[in-house]
């Protein structure tokens, strides 16, 4: 596969959320506003790129039998870095994302790419794969976050969109709204992929 | 910590703040294993078991090894040799994510070996679900909620872990009952599979929202 393809496959064709159904918990839990979606997306992309980079570098040094614990330790290290940086520089965002920052460790996208891609490919390809998957994940978080914020609060990035008379559908920022938005989004993406064929 | 508080934690974790439907933890097994009723029962039992155990173990690790307080074991050990050390020199709370995930991963491995040796029938029932549990974010999530967010006592942590497991099992069993019926329903082709499962989960989550009116 061409190098560019390693990046673009994560955006739609092998999108981690829509097609592979990985990383569903943070996708629904933190997307009640768009800012949270962007913050989570950047954090996950950082961890994904760094862990893919390190794992593709050490893949020949790690004995096969203990590779999973080693991968988890590498991922957990970068998650700790993200957690401390976010708590130090963006305390508001860190509070809003709560336990979902440490839970990036068990996000199946990251371990899935480490095990399925970075442990078999060279550094440059792993880097691009991590970046593409991260951006694809962030894209979905931003779309769901925007839809839920517009319908559920009538704002976008905190700015009011409609006049005084707009009654927001509170349901959309509550948990059921998250389930409904992702159901419709996956349905639409299935429809789109079928049309493209 | 009195009995009323403990009950409150239990009811809240099972119904009001259901771990799957209100907190969005453990969605992967919730959608992956809920196609068959008996499989979801097995998975639910394995989660209750490991979650209760993990809550107890991670609480001990957090209170006695990571927090910079006088009962910290690492501090006490060094205090024997050098009385001038203070607890604040042993602040390892930032390592909590790494410590918890490694503890949970080895705990799951240990449970698997012990169950296999002690009770082969139980291993038959839970065996294939145990390895999947390491990456179930509900386990790590409950551990973080017990220690970092809510600062529960030991008893409260264990009760919270156990009842969050019950809540997970309840949601999983309800979901698998609905999905077995859904097999026969006429669903639009692009909504088949995952999207319709999410719709059902959304409706269940809506129903569980009703419990937030519970008052004691």
Image (cartoon, rainbow, N blue to C red):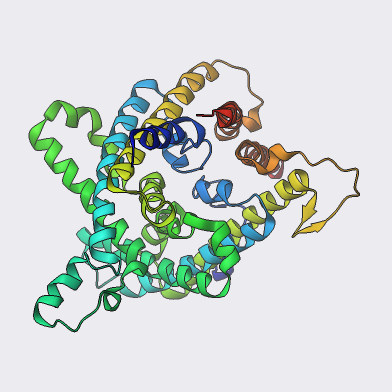
Query: Compared with residue B106, is residue B22 higher up or lower down, i.e. above or below?
Result: above
Q: Is residue A71 visible?
A: no
Q: What residue is at 19 percent from the left and 84 percent from the top?
A: B84
Q: Most extreme residue toward the front, as rendered?
A: B2
**Relative to B22, is A55 above or below?**
below
Q: Whole-percent x and y of residue B88?
A: 30, 76
Q: Position of residue B143 (x, y in %)?
A: 35, 50
The image quarter in which residue B210 lies:
top right
Residue A75 percent across, percent down from the top left: 38, 65
Judged left or right of residue B114, residue A184 is right
Image vertical order of residue A159 relative to residue B161, above or below: below
Residue found at x 42% / y 24%? B173
Q: For residue B20, say whether it is visible.
A: yes
Locate the C terminus of chain A by quadrant. Answer: top right
Front one among B11 and B44: B11
**Drawn side of residue B122 relative to residue A170, left or right:** left
Number of marks present in the image shown? 0
Viewer-side residue, A51 vs A82: A82
Residue B84 or B191: which is nearer the viewer?
A: B84
Q: Which x, y percent locates residue A81? A: 43, 72
* In the foreground, B52 or A5: B52
In this rendering, position of residue A178 left or right of residue B59: right
Residue B49 in which image quadrant: top left
Image vertical order of residue A188 relative to residue A41, above or below: above
């Amino acid at each position: 596969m061409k190098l560019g393809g390693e990046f673009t496959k994560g955006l739609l064709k092998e999108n981690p959320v829509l097609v592979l159904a990985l990383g569903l918990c943070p996708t629904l839990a933190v997307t009640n506003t768009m800012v949270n979606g962007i913050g989570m997306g950047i954090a996950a992309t950082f961890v994904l790129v760094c862990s893919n980079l390190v794992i593709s570098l050490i893949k020949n040094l790690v004995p096969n039998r203990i590779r999973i614990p080693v991968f988890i330790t590498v991922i957990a290290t970068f998650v700790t870095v993200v957690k401390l940086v976010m708590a130090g520089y963006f305390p508001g965002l860190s509070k809003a994302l709560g336990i979902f920052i440490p839970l990036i460790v068990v996000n199946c996208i990251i371990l899935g790419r480490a095990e399925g891609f970075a442990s078999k490919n060279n550094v440059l390809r792993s880097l691009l794969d991590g970046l593409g998957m991260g951006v694809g994940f962030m894209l979905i978080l931003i779309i769901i976050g925007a839809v839920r914020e517009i319908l559920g609060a009538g704002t976008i990035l905190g700015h009011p969109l409609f006049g005084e008379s707009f009654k927001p559908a509170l349901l959309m920022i509550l948990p059921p709204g998250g389930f409904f938005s992702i159901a419709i989004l996956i349905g639409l993406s299935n429809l789109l992929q079928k049309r493209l064929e | 910590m009195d009995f009323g508080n403990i009950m409150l934690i239990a009811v809240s974790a099972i119904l009001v703040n259901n771990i799957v439907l209100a907190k969005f933890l453990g969605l992967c097994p919730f959608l992956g294993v809920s196609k068959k009723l008996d499989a979801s029962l097995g998975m639910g039992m394995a989660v209750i078991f490991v979650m209760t155990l993990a809550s107890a173990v991670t609480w001990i690790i957090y209170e006695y090894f990571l927090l910079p307080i006088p009962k910290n074991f690492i501090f006490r050990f060094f205090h024997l040799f050098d009385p001038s050390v203070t607890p604040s020199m042993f602040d390892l709370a930032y390592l909590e994510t790494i410590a918890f995930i490694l503890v949970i991963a080895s705990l799951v491995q240990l449970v698997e070996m012990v169950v296999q040796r002690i009770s082969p029938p139980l291993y038959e029932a839970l065996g294939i679900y145990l390895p999947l549990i390491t990456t179930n974010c509900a386990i790590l999530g409950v551990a973080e909620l017990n220690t970092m967010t809510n600062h529960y006592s030991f008893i409260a942590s264990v009760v919270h872990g156990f009842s969050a497991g019950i809540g997970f099992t309840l949601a999983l069993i309800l979901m698998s009952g609905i999905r077995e019926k859904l097999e026969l329903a006429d669903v639009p082709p692009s909504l088949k599979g995952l999207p319709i499962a999410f719709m059902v989960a959304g409706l269940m989550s809506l129903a569980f929202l009703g419990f937030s009116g519970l008052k004691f």
